């Protein structure tokens, strides 16, 4: 048997596909026949020094995958399966694993470390394997270097795997002691020191207590800083990673060390190898992130009761930090703009400079402008690019008052550079900078825009010209036009300054989408996104041009659907294109559908659009499905009841979408489209409701479906009820208990973290919208009595929500609306119930005196229906 | 424990357009859902519907209340549905949506306690709807007066009016030409919330608090083409009545409107809102045509020629309650204004009241020969014999056929209007009558008070 396992594991890595497949099937069979013995033999294989490194490693990996999965449900199943295994088998497996940590084979050790951490991840939260950490640490000082390295690595993985609350402080102290000793400069083995440094990175989340102790913290910080000076590059890099993690986890504890950290990071940025320099730079970017968050949260006013004070590290370091960053800008990579994956010190430096500008605002300008002025006209392209990048980077943060005068001058210069500069890299950055000027200094919220009637024509001419440049420059030019258009989007119905150029813009963008090389540098996406934004800001005057664009886009979609692609790469591109085209059509539909006159015109093409959308569902791409579904929702909304004729054909794709658990975004969007259909078709949607309701109910009961889809499903019940009225009767018996269960859960699941409370509120809101729709749907029918049995629980739900005192504004508004709907529909029959509820008293009166006008209006309405229900 | 990748986005917009499209869609759907909810909430409640007795579990339900409720025309008030109507249908539909005061032909009881009074501005009665970024005003006959941006909720596509919001507001207004101002006399819907079922007292309160808040009372601007204005409303006591009657207002007065404080907004004719005019507070005491012109001699002359045709003997009818007997009288030109009545299948000539009052009946032979159809609005003059009353009820009307009514006309006249017009020419109701009615009831109250105070 054991012999056999080795061979199967080796075969499973064979080059020959058939051999590989056969071996995989054998493994699967083995696992299904006897899980305990399967896992045990894998552990045995891993621990056996006689076996080939390859089979040992794979044995470990299969063992690891038997304990964990990405998908939440699968993960849960695996955990339960492991916990249910026979105790003695588990002990044997664990013994094999711990033994492997002292194996001379590095792969076997490292794999064992990972498996141990996974087992710990399952067992420690269950209060099992409590002795693990003690065992690992018991004789760490006597271990040979390679075992010590493996043990430290294991501790690191364990810290990554389990949450801090399952490891008691005593164990944390021991881990930290071992780790810091391993990191110490007295440790002569680099492998040990590296493993220790990486372990500290993972352990930082466990060390709140130790970081609050000045002596312990000083010691940890000293060891980390020393490690940044290690002769071994990997150790230096790992040490700077620790500093980055410390900067965000323990920002408020950094003050005593910041001066020293600045010195060592500055040195690393200037002199060290790039991976180390990048981490050193990242320390400052991370400090910026922290200070931006703090300043945003407290509006810049440090008050005694804010949780974390701002220490203004960036502001203090500014005079030395900025020159350091500017210097890095001159170290550009040769072709970094053509390389999607590029990330170098110049890019990181500019990014950090942008964050610094956002942190300190106006103060940055005088420090950067001399560099810009000095370099912008130099012969060396690196200097011109660095100057432009520096200028572009500081456009977000400082006040428009300070920036606008500078940008007005710079814009003229940059427009010329975009036309004439011989270097593509310079042009790329120039177009990007122009885009940033429009993003931050143009638009209806500003007093003065950098775009004026006198330069508008020139700007557009230059940008359209640049769209014919090399792909990366053209992409940035599209981006600039995107922000230019966005700035005009809020102008209202008055004549847009874009009107005279509108036709040219549409034509040029359309041409860009058809460029042979549009697939490079994300140009295709940028061109469609810009086209969308231009369409969004079209006016009554320019709408006819958008109408003319529509058949062109439909033709592109048609052509794409017709073309045969064989390689998977080509198919990916084809799917991407179809997604972009559907996205563009969605925007056009929404725009033209918003005015009665243009709506009638574009609806003449509805048949054609619909048949193309349905064909997009033939592809396998979730993104394309999502975009087509969104476009169909927009079309249904615009078409209203005449959408009915598409339902027979569309319905099966609707079902498909509602069952797509895997790509939950598609499912979520489809649920939204059901709402659109309800409002468009009203009672004509009823023939499809049996199927839709079945899928929605299945979706709700599924553990596999992402939780974010569930709140909209409850709202969707309301949409359906509102559309079909008393026909909804037949679903009540299924729907109401389900809503009720969810409602009760949503009252009590609060009190978690922000994410959880946000989710809980969105769930409440969905549930409440569902109730609202059902009440209003039944109103005026002879079946209102069917809702009477639920009234008590619903009122109780409202009361409970009110008493929990943690509803957000939206949920509150919907809740008080439900109170009104209940009174409106059930009337005098529910008068006593209503009068006995807290909601009709404290909750209502609280809402009535709210400052939020929408909430107040909902409350006034509820007040009216209640007084009517009570008075008769 | 792979090295963490601290790569940051480089030269990329922070939000992808796809995410924007998704967000836009969600926003649109949420807004549409809200609108659908609000529309549903605006529909009449079923609580009191008489076809649904099981909900009426209260045994001693006041029968008159129930009856009143069933008489209220359906309030399924969906502006967007209605906006799809065209031409005649649209005019008919909108024409039915206004509350039409009856003409005051006698002084209601408890005037000072239960009623409001205010001076009606001279101008075009219309119906202002703001929704979906535009404001439309429609005249009583349903035709559009203006389409314009306004500061009313969802009344323009300006930035802060949040173009996504499609909730609507509806107001009952009078457009006053001289200062190009919409004077708001009542409010029906505000941000999608129906106020139909609210008392006038509440509606006026709401109007006063919300209108100014919206900025609609501000001077015209790019996003707000016409100014809206509130009207001072008084309790109908001695002071209030005098203030409304004689007080200075920025507009030309056209009579006084009286609103019962408890009255809900009821479309069509209602005795709970009353209009009264005399020559001091209106230049249009004698009824005017649609354009506000007083019918002039020439028109009547022209008509008189028409009427002297050989058919003239058949063109007169006399009203006898519950009688089909037709009798014809000679029409006497130059005598009085005309009345407009709606021709029924059986030849009866009805007012616009609900239930209608029949003022006469046309001979079927005449109906055929003149090419008239049921539903036609016909003009008649009131003949020498005028209207005669018996025990305060119309007993006899001397009517002479003139011709079909102006096409813009959507309604027959109401009973109260015809009677008021008749009274104006014979025994008008005067300001003094109101004042004395108030004084007498005040006296009674004062007496009661005196008694209580001494007791």
Image: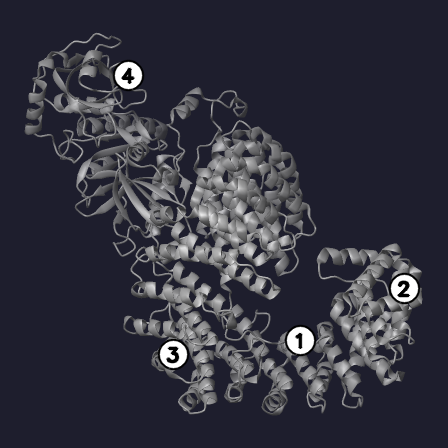
Mark pair 2, 4: CA separation: 97 Å
Mark pair 3, 1: CA separation: 38 Å
Q: Which residue has dot 3 on it?
A: A402
The answer to whether residue A327 is seen in the rendering is yes
Q: Nearer the viewer, residue A837 or A550?
A: A550
| Mark 4, secondary structure of its residue | loop
| Above or below: residue B167 compared with residue A319 | above
| Residue drawn 28% across the image and 16% down it | B345
> Which comes before the other along the chain, label 1 or label 4?
1
Mark pair 1, 4: CA separation: 88 Å
Please report contact status of discs 3 and 1: CB closer than 8 Å, yes or no: no
Q: Which residue has dot 1 on it?
A: B4
Q: Nearer the viewer, residue A458 or A159?
A: A458
Q: Which residue has dot 4 on it?
A: B345
Please report contact status of discs 3 and 2: CB closer than 8 Å, yes or no: no
| Mark 3, secondary structure of its residue | helix
Callout 1: chain = B
| Mark 2, secondary structure of its residue | helix
Nearer mark to the viewer, of 3 and 1:
1
Position of A171 with respect to A70 (left or right) is right
Nearer mark to the viewer, of 2 and 4:
2
Nearer mark to the viewer, of 2 and 1:
2
């Amino acid at each position: 048997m054991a012999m056999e396992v080795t061979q199967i594991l080796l075969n499973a890595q064979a080059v020959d596909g058939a051999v590989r497949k056969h071996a995989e099937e054998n493994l699967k069979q083995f696992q299904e026949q006897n899980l305990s013995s399967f896992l045990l033999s894998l552990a045995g294989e891993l621990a056996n020094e006689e076996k080939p490194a390859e089979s040992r490693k794979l044995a470990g990996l299969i063992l690891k995958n038997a304990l964990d999965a990405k998908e939440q449900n699968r993960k849960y199943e695996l955990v339960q399966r492991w916990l249910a295994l026979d105790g003695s088998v588990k002990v044997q497996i664990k013994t094999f694993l711990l033994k492997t940590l002292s194996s001379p084979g590095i792969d076997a050790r490292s794999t064992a470390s990972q498996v141990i951490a996974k087992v710990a991840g399952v067992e420690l939260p269950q209060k099992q394997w409590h002795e693990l950490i003690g065992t690992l640490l018991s004789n760490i000082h006597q271990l040979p270097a390679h075992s010590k390295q493996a043990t430290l690595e294991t501790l690191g993985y364990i810290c990554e795997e389990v949450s801090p609350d399952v490891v008691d402080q005593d164990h944390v102290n021991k881990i930290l002691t071992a780790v810091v000793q391993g990191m110490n400069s007295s440790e002569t083995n680099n492998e040990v020191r590296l493993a220790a440094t990486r372990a500290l990175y993972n352990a930082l989340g466990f060390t709140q207590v130790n970081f609050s102790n000045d002596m312990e913290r000083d010691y940890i910080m000293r060891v980390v800083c020393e490690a940044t000076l290690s002769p071994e590059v990997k150790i230096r890099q790992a040490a700077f990673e620790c500093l980055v993690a410390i900067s965000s986890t323990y920002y408020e504890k950094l003050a005593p060390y910041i001066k020293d950290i600045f010195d060592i990071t500055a040195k690393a940025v200037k002199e060290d190898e790039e991976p180390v320099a990048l981490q050193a730079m990242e320390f400052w970017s991370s400090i910026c992130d922290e200070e931006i968050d703090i300043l945003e949260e407290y509006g810049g006013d440090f008050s005694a009761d804010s949780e974390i004070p701002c220490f203004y590290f960036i502001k203090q370091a500014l005079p030395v930090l900025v020159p350091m960053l500017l210097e890095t800008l001159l170290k550009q990579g040769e072709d970094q703009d053509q390389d999607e994956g590029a990330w170098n010190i110049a890019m990181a430096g500019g990014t950090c400079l942008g964050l610094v500008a956002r942190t300190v605002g106006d103060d940055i300008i005088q420090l950067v402008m001399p560099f810009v002025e000095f370099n912008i006209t130099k012969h060396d392209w690196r200097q011109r690019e660095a100057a432009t990048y520096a200028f572009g980077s500081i456009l977000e943060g400082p006040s428009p008052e300070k920036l606008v005068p500078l940008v007005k001058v710079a814009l003229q210069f940059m427009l010329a550079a975009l036309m004439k500069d011989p270097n593509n890299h310079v042009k790329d950055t120039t177009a990007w900078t122009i885009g940033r000027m429009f993003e931050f200094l143009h638009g209806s919220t500003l007093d003065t825009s950098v775009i004026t009637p006198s330069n508008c024509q020139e700007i557009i001419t230059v940008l359209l010209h640049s769209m014919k440049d090399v792909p990366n420059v053209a992409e940035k030019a599209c981006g600039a036009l995107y922000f230019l258009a966005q700035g005009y989007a809020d102008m209202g119905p008055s004549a847009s300054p874009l009107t005279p150029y509108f036709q040219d813009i549409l034509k040029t963008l359309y041409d860009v989408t058809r460029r042979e090389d549009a697939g490079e540098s994300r140009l295709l996406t940028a061109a469609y996104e810009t086209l969308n934004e231009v369409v969004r800001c079209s006016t009554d005057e320019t709408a006819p041009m958008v109408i003319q664009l529509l058949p062109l886009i439909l033709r592109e979609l048609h052509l794409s659907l017709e073309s045969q692609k064989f390689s998977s790469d080509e198919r990916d591109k084809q799917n991407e294109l179809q997604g972009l085209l559907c996205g563009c059509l969605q925007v056009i539909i929404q725009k033209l559908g918003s005015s009665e006159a243009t709506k009638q015109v574009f609806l003449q093409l509805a048949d054609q659009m619909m048949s193309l959308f349905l064909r997009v569902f033939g592809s396998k791409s979730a993104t394309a499905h999502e975009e087509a579904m969104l476009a169909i929702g927009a079309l249904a909304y615009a078409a209203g009841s005449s959408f009915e004729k598409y339902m027979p054909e569309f319905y099966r794709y609707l079902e498909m979408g509602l069952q797509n658990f895997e790509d939950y975004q598609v499912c979520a969007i489809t649920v939204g489209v059901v709402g659109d259909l309800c409002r468009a078709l009203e009672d004509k949607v009823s023939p499809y409701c049996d199927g839709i309701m079945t899928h929605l109910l299945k979706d709700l009961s599924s553990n596999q479906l992402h939780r974010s889809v569930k709140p909209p499903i409850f709202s969707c019940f309301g949409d359906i009820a509102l559309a079909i009225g008393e026909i909804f009767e037949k679903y009540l018996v299924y729907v109401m208990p389900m809503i009720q269960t969810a409602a009760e859960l949503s009252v009590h699941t609060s009190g978690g973290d922000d994410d959880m409370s946000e989710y809980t509120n969105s769930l409440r809101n969905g549930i409440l919208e569902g109730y609202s729709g059902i009440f209003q749907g039944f109103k005026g029918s002879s079946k209102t009595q069917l809702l009477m049995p639920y009234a008590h629980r619903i009122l109780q739900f409202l009361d409970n929500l009110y008493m929990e005192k943690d509803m957000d504004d939206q949920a509150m508004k919907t809740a008080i609306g439900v109170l009104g709907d209940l009174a409106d529909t059930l009337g005098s029959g529910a008068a006593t119930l209503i009068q006995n509820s807290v909601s009709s008293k404290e909750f209502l009166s609280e809402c009535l005196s709210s400052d939020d006008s929408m909430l107040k209006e909902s409350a006034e309405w509820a007040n009216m229906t209640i007084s009517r229900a009570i008075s008769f | 424990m792979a090295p963490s990748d601290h790569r940051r986005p480089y030269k990329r917009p922070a939000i992808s357009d796809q995410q924007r499209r998704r967000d836009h869609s969600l926003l649109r759907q949420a807004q549409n859902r809200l609108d659908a909810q609000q529309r549903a909430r605006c529909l009449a409640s079923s609580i009191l519907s008489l076809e649904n007795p099981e909900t009426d579990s209260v045994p001693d339900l006041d029968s008159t209340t129930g009856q009143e409720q069933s008489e209220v025309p359906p309030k399924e008030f969906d502006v967007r549905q209605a906006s799809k109507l065209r031409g005649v249908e649209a005019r008919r539909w909108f024409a039915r949506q206004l509350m039409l005061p009856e003409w005051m032909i006698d002084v209601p009881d408890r005037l000072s306690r239960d009623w409001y009074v205010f001076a009606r501005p001279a101008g075009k009665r219309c119906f202002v709807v703001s929704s979906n970024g535009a404001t439309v005003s429609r005249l009583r006959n349903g035709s559009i007066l203006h389409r314009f941006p306004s500061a009313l909720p969802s009344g323009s596509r300006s930035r802060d009016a949040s173009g996504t919001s499609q909730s609507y507001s509806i107001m009952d207004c009078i457009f006053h030409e001289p200062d190009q101002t919409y004077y708001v006399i009542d409010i029906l819907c505000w941000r999608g919330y129906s106020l139909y079922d609210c008392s006038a007292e509440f509606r006026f309160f709401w109007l006063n608090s919300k209108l100014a808040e919206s900025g609609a009372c501000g001077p015209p601007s790019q996003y707000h083409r016409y100014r809206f204005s509130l009207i001072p409303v008084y309790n109908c006591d001695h002071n209030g009545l005098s203030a409304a009657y004689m007080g200075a207002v920025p507009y030309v007065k056209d009579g006084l409107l009286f609103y019962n404080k408890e009255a809900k907004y009821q479309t069509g004719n209602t005795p709970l809102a009353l209009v009264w005019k005399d020559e001091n507070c209106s230049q249009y005491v004698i009824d005017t045509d649609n354009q506000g012109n007083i019918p002039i001699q020439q028109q009547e002359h022209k008509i008189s020629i028409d009427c002297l045709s050989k058919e003239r003997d058949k063109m007169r009818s006399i009203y006898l309650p519950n009688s089909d007997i037709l009798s014809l009288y000679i029409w006497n030109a130059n005598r009085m204004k005309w009345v407009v009545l709606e021709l029924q299948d059986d030849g009866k000539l009805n007012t616009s009241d609900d239930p209608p009052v029949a003022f006469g009946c046309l001979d079927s032979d005449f109906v055929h020969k003149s090419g008239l159809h049921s539903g036609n609005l016909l003009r008649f003059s009131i003949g020498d014999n005028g209207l005669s009353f018996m025990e305060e009820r119309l007993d006899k009307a001397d009517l002479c056929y003139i011709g079909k009514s102006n096409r813009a006309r959507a309604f027959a006249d109401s009973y109260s209007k015809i009677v008021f017009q008749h009274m104006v020419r014979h025994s008008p109701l005067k300001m003094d009558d109101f004042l004395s009615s108030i004084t007498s009831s005040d006296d009674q109250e004062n007496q009661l008070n005196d008694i209580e105070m001494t007791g």
